[in-house]
Image: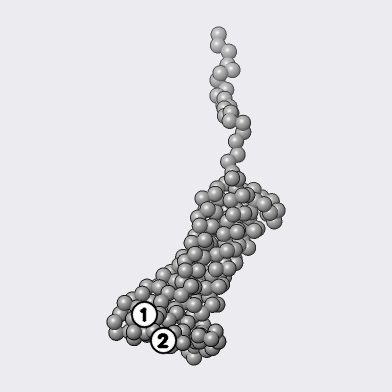
């Protein structure tokens, strides 16, 4: 597969990762109620996200309420808000840079500059992937710790957004890694033959 094909694949992976990051940021499914042991009441289900907390009844009715203050949130969700928003912004910027420097576009005609531009886009996607995976893993670790803590009465499990976030981060890292590997300047050869010049004028002297 040529560099153009790899870049098209990276664009598709980046778009999927960006969509996953947006879904993870907006949908309140980071933590959901767990019904185990004596907690068998399934009439109500709690769902927590980055921006709001929802209560879903068994009839399908859902009531959501935004958090009153950012200070009431645990530290992992506070960091996740900032890091995921930055990840979305970096992903969009990296996609824009990639479109300018890709081989299948004619925005920039200088072939020596295009690999450098795609390399910058690849680094940006790597950063965006890390900014996506870190808060998701942090929140998942805290949720598992609280689930195994016997002092916590209300058990919460990992929501769908945790797994979507892992997938989105992996796609962004894969796209960035491919771009960094294939963003190499094209070598220019002159037919494979090296030219040598004789700069010694003494070879043309006549000896008596």
Q: Residues within 10 Å of mark 2 (few under 14, many from 20)?
A: few
Q: Residues within 10 Å of mark 1 (few under 14, many from 20)?
A: few
Can residue 9 be seen here? The reply is yes
* Image location (x, y in percent) of residue 162: 46, 71
Q: Is residue 48 above or below residue 14?
A: below
Query: Which residue does the image show at 48% across and 61% down from the upper left?
Result: 170
Query: Which residue does the image show at 44% across and 84% down from the upper left?
Result: 42
- Among the two numbered marks 1 and 2 on one chain, the one whose residue lies closer to the N terminus: 1
* Image location (x, y in percent) of residue 55: 49, 87
Task: Identify the residue under disc 1.
Answer: 36
Indicate which disc residue 125 carries: none
* Image location (x, y in percent) of residue 110: 66, 50
Query: Which residue does the image show at 33% across and 81% down from the upper left?
Result: 37
Q: How many marks?
A: 2
Q: CA distance from mark 1 to mark 2?
A: 9 Å
Q: In what quadrant of the picture does the N terminus appear?
A: top right
Residue furthest left as drawn: 150
Q: Is residue 28 above or below residue 94?
A: below
Q: Nearer the viewer, residue 89 or 149?
A: 149
Q: In what quadrant of the picture does the C terminus appear?
A: top right
Q: Is residue 182 above or below residue 89?
A: above
Indicate which disc residue 41 carries: 2
Q: Secondary structure at mark 1?
A: loop
- The image's colouring method is one colour
Q: Kindly indicate whether the residue at mark 2 contacts the one at mark 1 (C-beta within 8 angstroms).
A: no
Q: Is residue 62 left or right of residue 107?
A: left
């Amino acid at each position: 597969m040529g560099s153009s094909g790899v870049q098209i694949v990276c664009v598709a992976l980046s778009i999927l990762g960006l969509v996953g990051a947006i879904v993870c940021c907006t949908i309140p499914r980071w933590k959901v109620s767990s019904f185990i042991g004596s907690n068998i009441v399934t009439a109500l289900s709690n769902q927590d996200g980055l921006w709001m907390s929802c209560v879903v009844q068994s009839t399908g009715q859902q009531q959501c309420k935004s958090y009153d203050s950012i200070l009431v949130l645990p530290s992992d969700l506070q960091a996740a808000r900032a890091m995921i928003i930055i990840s979305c912004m970096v992903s969009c910027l990296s996609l824009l840079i990639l479109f300018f420097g890709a081989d299948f576009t004619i925005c920039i005609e200088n072939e020596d500059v295009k690999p450098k531009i795609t390399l910058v886009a690849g680094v940006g996607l790597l950063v965006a992937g890390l900014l996506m995976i870190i808060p998701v893993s942090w929140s998942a670790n805290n949720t598992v710790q609280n689930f195994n803590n016997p002092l916590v009465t209300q058990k919460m499990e990992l929501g769908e957004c945790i797994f979507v976030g892992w997938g989105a981060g992996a796609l962004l890292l894969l796209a960035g890694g491919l771009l960094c590997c294939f963003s190499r300047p094209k070598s220019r050869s002159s037919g494979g033959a090296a030219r040598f010049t004789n700069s010694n004028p003494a070879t043309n002297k006549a000896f008596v």
